[in-house]
Amino acid sequence: MSKGRVLLGVVAAPHGVRGLVRIRSFTEDPMAIASYGALSDEKGTKEYRVEALSSVKGAVLARIEGVADRTAAEAVRGLRLYVERDRLPETAEREWYEADLIGLAAFDREGRDWGKVMAFHDFGAGRTMEVSGGSASRHSVMLPFTDAAVPEIDVEGGKVTVDPPAGLLTGGPAKEAED
């Protein structure tokens, strides 16, 4: 496992007047965000102890130690919560932390450069991987994060192989439909 910290969640908004917050959790089980012990801010200078109370509308309703009222909850809105990398469990085969994939070079099977992995998103229809900056496309491209569209991942080698679905880019490097 690489060194450093991994983003586990972001404080989305206050909830009520008693200091509760909604946290957008990036853990597989959203409620697990509180199971890693103290989390830190982006710079790693301040620690936050999170108590997950319940799931609510795609977020976790939580209490953060030291946040006692709505004003304090407003002050932590947007706070990015990180955990030290060595506190995360090892991944299984064909399983990765998204943080390990961000920044990897993306090439298709013909060797065309699609740029770098920029981010992962979930807009409701499954995970997508955003790649950008390559010569194969002038724009950011969202690929389904599936075995078909991302057939090979080589973290140690610093690259992913992509196989964009037919028609993803009109006139671009996407595979043409066979007659």
Image (cartoon, grey):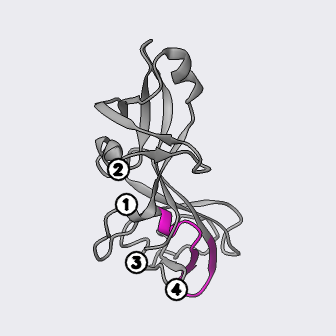
For label 2, the SS is helix
Q: Which residue is mark 3?
A: 151
For label 3, the SS is loop
Residue 92, position in %: x, y? 28, 73
Of the numbered discs 2 and 1, the one sitting upstream in the chain is 2
Residue 144 appears in view: no
Segment tinted magenta in the rendering: 99-115
Amino acid found under the numbered disc labelled 2: Tyr
Q: Is residue 16 left or right of residue 41?
A: left
What is the C-alpha distance between the residues marked 1 and 3? 29 Å
Dots 2 and 1: beta carbons under 8 Å?
A: yes
What is the C-alpha distance between the residues marked 2 and 4? 29 Å
Residue 46, position in %: x, y? 56, 43
Q: Which residue is mark 4?
A: 157
Name the residue: 62% across, 73% down.
114
- Binning the other alpha carbons within 10 Å of mark 3 as few (below 14), some (14 to 19) or many (20 upward) gives some
Q: Can you say whether 7 is above or below 102 in the image? A: above
What is the C-alpha distance between the residues marked 2 and 1? 7 Å
Q: Is residue 138 left or right of residue 67?
A: right
What is the C-alpha distance between the residues marked 4 and 3? 15 Å
Residue 60, position in %: x, y? 35, 34
